[in-house]
Amino acid sequence: MFKEENVFNQRLTLNLPLGIELYVKREDLLHREISGNKFRKLKYNISEAQQLGYKQLLTFGGAYSNHIAAVAAAGRILGIETIGVIRGDELVNCYRENPTLLKAEQDGMRFKFVSRSVYRERTNAEFIASLATEFGSFYLVPEGGTNALAIKGTEEILKNDDQVFDYVCCAIGTGGTIAGLINSSFDNQVVLGFPALKGDFLSTEIKKYTVKENWQLVHDYHFGGYGKVPAELVDFLQDLHMTTGVLFDPIYNGKMVYGVLDMIQQGVFKEGSRILLIHTGGLQGWNDIIKGK
Ligand SMILES: *Cc1c(COP(=O)(O)O)cnc(C)c1O
């Protein structure tokens, strides 16, 4: 179901200063429907659920969540029931206007829409027990899919050949992807993470799952916060698509790429640096932008 052989490192032929070389790991090609890093994070969770004999997966997410889309598609493909607890009870009558939720429903996901205050209880044991009473027993995948088994999956992104890179860069939501990259990084490398949202809780999350210290967060390129996509960013990504043939999503990867190119222009990277960008997928994020989210 998961095509490792589709993934390769593509050089971005841009006119960069200081002999800097930029490559993209095309994890977006891992699966046609399931966004790259979401697949990595689900892989070992789903095999655990199957080994434990669960027939249902339950997870949490917002209306535009790539994770919700990924769980629903994986469930359909593997024949596992899926339940999505969705933030925002106002969506109950209009969720089909949202492309992510419509597709998830077509993939067989059942929804429970909850208010923002109920959603905040998503890690509370009593609330989870009440969901089991309502839906029957399920394997719980946390919001964003990040847990120890997810990181076992994201540790498989970097390969031995990738040791030639001095920097590995990725976008961050919950921190599960960067945690795996850090664990599998080589000692000569620095891992740079670009949070797609505001806030400083991320370092603590990442430290829960990692022991190395060869990483840094770059907080300057969230463009106003999660899901904020100014016209300047859209134009930049469309131009980059034209010149390189690679399309990045506007919610996560687009902000990271913008940031890396800006930092290259500012001289942050030393002469001759080889930089690897991890394209985590998420291209369905464009659907919501085009619909005028
Ligand atoms: C979810 C997502 C991320 C964030 O990954 P985390 O492991 O939560 O940090 C990055 N890129 C895309 C395309 C995503 O869908």
Image: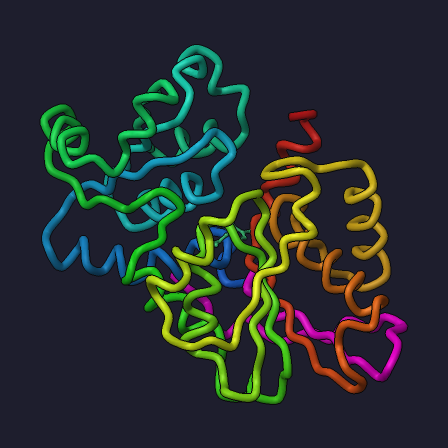
Q: In this view, does 155 lie above or below 57?
A: below
Asked whether, in this view, residue 187 is left or right of residue 261, the answer is left
Residue 23 image offset from top left, x and y in percent: 69, 74
Which residue appears at 70% of the width and 42% of the height? 223
Picture quadrant of residue 89: top left
Residue 42 image offset from top left, x and y in percent: 34, 55
Q: Is residue 132 above or below residue 179?
A: above
Residue 6 image offset from top left, x and y in percent: 54, 70
Q: In this view, does 85 lie above or below 252?
A: above
- Residue 254 visible in the shown view: no
Picture quadrant of residue 269: bottom right
**Colour convention:** rainbow
Q: In this view, does 188 lie above or below 132?
A: below
Q: Nearer the viewer, residue 245 or 42?
A: 42
Q: Nearer the viewer, residue 180 or 58?
A: 180
- Residue 249 visible in the shown view: yes
The image quadrant where one finds the N terminus is: bottom left
Q: What stretch is highlighted in magenta?
A: 1-28
The image quadrant where one finds the C terminus is: top right
Question: So how many labels did they put on this image?
Answer: 0
Asked whether, in this view, residue 62 is left or right of residue 75, the answer is right
Q: Is residue 49 magenta?
A: no
Which residue appears at 73% of the width and 64% of the height? 260
Q: Nearer the viewer, residue 247 or 169?
A: 169
Which residue appears at 36% of the width and 50% of the height? 145
Q: Which of 35 and 181 is in front in this view?
A: 181
Residue 153 image offset from top left, x and y in percent: 36, 66
Asked whether, in this view, residue 37 is left or right of residue 171, the answer is left
Which residue appears at 76% of the width and 36% of the height? 230
